[in-house]
Amino acid sequence: MPIVSLSRIADARSGDKGEGSNVGVMARSDAAFAFLKRALTTEVVKAHMHAINFGAVKRYESESLRVLNFILADSLGGGGSASLKTDAQGKTHGLALLRLKLDVPADVLASTPE
Amino acid sequence: MARKDKVLVANGQGFWGDSLLGPIRLCREGPIDYLTLDYLAEVTMSILQKQYLRDPSKGFATDFVKMIDRTAPELVKKGIKVVANAGGVNPMACKDATIAALHRQGFKGVKIAVVEGDNIYGQLDGLLAGGEELKNMDTGAALSSVRSKVTSANVYLGAFPTAEALDRGAQIVITGRGTDPGLVLGPLIHEFGWKPSDYDLIAAGTIAGHIVECGAQCTGGNYVDWRAVKNMAMVGYPIVEASADGSFVITKHAGTGGMVTPRSILHQLVYEMGDPKNYIGPDGTADFTSIKMEQEGPDRVRITGAKGGPPTPTYKVSISYEDGWKALGQLTISGPDALEKARLCAEIVWKRLEYDGCTFKEHEKLVEFVGANVCHAGIDVPHASEPSEVVLRLGVKGADKARIERFGYELVPLVTSGPPGVTGFAGGRPHATEIIGFWPALMRKDKVTTKVTLFES
């Protein structure tokens, strides 16, 4: 199975939620969504974002939207005006997650637009 | 009153600081019935409260008045109605400044409504004594632990007071803290006569409002496939073309940049989202997963099927409080060996401060090497280890203002007493600024009284 970035099969956007951020991952095909439901677990996201998020990771699913929504509980260095970080609102966390390397089955790649 | 078939509700500014061109172009480049503008973030309320305490004529979003100055002729000529949460903590002063702007442009007889009732700062002690605990929703802590430091307290009001203001003939509605989607929902309630128990319709209006509340973020701004976005400079701001049955089309004016597709809309639907099946607003809950999106024409996406549920018995309250001090400064370090020299610079700053008895705990300090993978820390990215230059960003925070100020003195000296290639100190010495803490809480809706007052320019 080819190793590709998550960005090959999904879009993402992120923003702040209190002292944490959310990353909405949007699969670009049904096959990609079915694959990501299995492969993109909270453990995988937590490990990939280990130097960005220091709290729990929660996942919400929406079949009809083909969306996996991740809440990173502690990813903003305090959040709001208490944060000293450059990305105090988590604006770049979506792109950070899209850099994740995944072993994606060839048939999923074939049915997912670039 | 005869109801319209379709109503065009546009969003011209997604936050305080958004481009002034959004509303100006929306008024010029095609038809709209309503112009909505969103100015308030949590931190904004606290800043406005401080301005108000220093000067009772301040405490509102001054960008709104600039916008009225620029767009008044078109707003009046075309009869465009305006709904904005520009009132901040002082909506009456915002109304006065708006009337003054209309007069400057020579317009009299414009009806302006002010929605009040969100600001509970003056009632806090009475509410606490009356049994409202206003516990922190995230931590569960009692408000009493920070009560003496509270600088603002506002309820997120629903959209029905805005609808009432429009029912009474207002062309401009100025509110304090309301929800962002409510700016769109209010006009739809007014136009279509939706009732509080029309949960699916309330959900539809809420979802429409959420999609457009950040301006161009649903029309190609902040979009992953950014190379595919045409004419981003003149990106079109979003317009909801709403129908009484709760279906709506998201579109933008012809000839503007960007695009409206299910994919561009989905990008915004997930923005700042929690549980997609249960989006809680003051007027009801919305199920984002219930909608169907269909591209019915170029830059036109029809959205149907929105489902919702009844509102909760509580309002969300946004409370802010003084939470210490912080200072941030930066220098640019050129190569060769940019990253290694930047690390040395950071060490030097902490050592010099320590020599002078000024130490900080790890969680009170920030060191960033911008250019060497700050945003995607811990993730393998190309060229992160050998940047040709980096921006060294240093920061501290804590309760003692004097210590935070002391830090600011040790950054710029690196130019002459550090490694070679240190520059970019144009910002000068960093100073201590206040940290504004955010305290989300809930309170019973029956303790809040809203008031709508009508004025004429």
Image: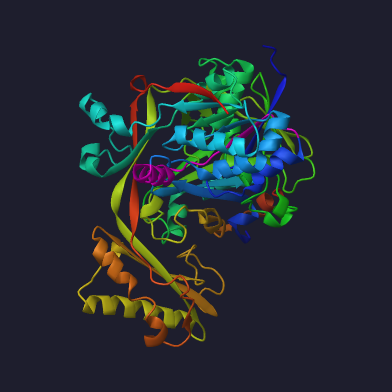
Range drawn in magenta:
B31-55
> Residue at the location (54% across, 53% down)?
A94
Q: Percent position (x, y) of residue B247?
A: 67, 24
Q: Is residue B43 magenta?
A: yes
> Residue at the location (73% across, 30% down)?
B78
Q: Can residue B264 be seen here?
A: no
Q: Percent position (x, y) of residue B24?
A: 68, 43
Q: Is residue B434 magenta?
A: no
Q: Percent position (x, y) of residue B359?
A: 23, 70
Is B92 situated above or below A29? above
Q: Which quadrant of the figure has residue B116?
A: top left
Q: Which quarter shows the N terminus of chain B?
A: top right
Between residues A74 and B102, which one lies in front from this camera angle?
B102
Between residues B174 and B194, which one lies in front from this camera angle?
B174
Is B144 situated above or below A13? above
Between residues A29 and B397, which one lies in front from this camera angle?
B397
Q: Which quadrant of the figure has residue B227?
A: bottom right
Is B282 situated above or below B331? above
Q: Percent position (x, y) of residue B94?
A: 49, 36
Q: Which quarter shows the C terminus of chain B?
A: top right
Q: Can residue B27 be seen here?
A: yes
Is B429 situated above or below B151? below
Q: Which quadrant of the figure has residue B3?
A: top right
Q: Is residue B122 left or right of residue B280?
A: left
